[in-house]
Image: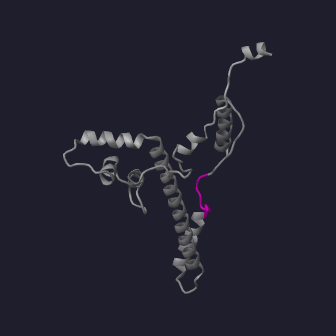
């Protein structure tokens, strides 16, 4: 029995529960691990309430205590380094996606409001016929009723020689009429 234990390595079970408890818990929320200054930097880059965002330097200067005598190149480097961090990049991308989504929703809402007003104008008998006609025309254009472009879906695979011969036949038939 001692011969068997002699060849086996002496292994111990080690728990890492202590190291898990000591680590700071990162939030699963996007941007949850950023400081207030970092969050402000990201929000200033994207812009808030429909406003245009700031430049990296403006956002950095707005959120961090920057002395007046700092060189512009140093400030640009610090702002660029901060913007390049993964957690900042992810949060800015998230904010930009939210901003674009809100913009699209507002555009759709605005379009619906305009179309509803035009429909009311078209149905209102107290409005002149010219205005009602123009409202109907605008509705028709919005629905694509008056397109001058003819859309042809030709999924046949043909060579340029076959297309040329077909075009010549059509042209000859038009000329002979």
Q: Position of residue 161 (x, y in %)?
A: 66, 29
Q: Position of residue 116 (x, y in %)?
A: 57, 74
Magenta region includes residue 100: no
Q: Residue furthest right?
A: 1
Q: Which is more toward the observer, 52 or 69?
A: 69
| Residue 155, above or below 38 | above
Residue range corresponding to the magenta coloring: 143-149
> Is 20 positioned to the left or the right of 166 in the image?
left
- The tally of labels here is 0
> Is 135 positioned to the left or the right of 64 in the image?
right
Looking at the magenta stretch, what is its main secondary structure? loop
Q: Position of residue 26 (x, y in %)?
A: 53, 48
Q: Which is more toward the observer, 165 or 49?
A: 49
Residue in view at x 59 percent, y 52 percent: 149
Q: Residue furthest front?
A: 2
| Residue 107, above or below 67 | below
Magenta region includes residue 148: yes
> Is 77 positioned to the left or the right of 88 in the image?
left
Quadrant, the N terminus:
top right
């Amino acid at each position: 029995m001692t011969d068997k234990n002699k060849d086996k390595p002496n292994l111990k079970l080690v728990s890492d529960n202590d190291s898990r408890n000591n680590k700071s818990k990162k939030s699963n929320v996007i941007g949850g691990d950023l400081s207030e200054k970092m969050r402000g930097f990201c929000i200033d880059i994207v812009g808030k309430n429909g406003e245009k965002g700031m430049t990296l330097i403006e956002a950095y200067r707005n959120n961090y205590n920057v002395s007046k005598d700092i060189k512009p190149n140093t400030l640009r480097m610090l702002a660029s380094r901060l913007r390049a961090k993964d957690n900042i990049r992810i949060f800015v991308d998230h904010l930009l996606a939210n901003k674009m989504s809100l913009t699209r929703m507002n555009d759709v809402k605005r379009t619906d409001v305009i179309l509803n007003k035009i429909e009311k104008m078209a149905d209102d008998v107290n409005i002149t016929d010219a205005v009602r006609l123009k409202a109907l025309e605008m509705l028709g254009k919005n629905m694509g009723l008056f397109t001058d472009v003819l859309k042809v879906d030709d999924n046949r695979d043909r060579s340029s020689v076959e297309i040329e011969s077909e075009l010549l036949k059509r042209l000859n038939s038009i000329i002979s009429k």
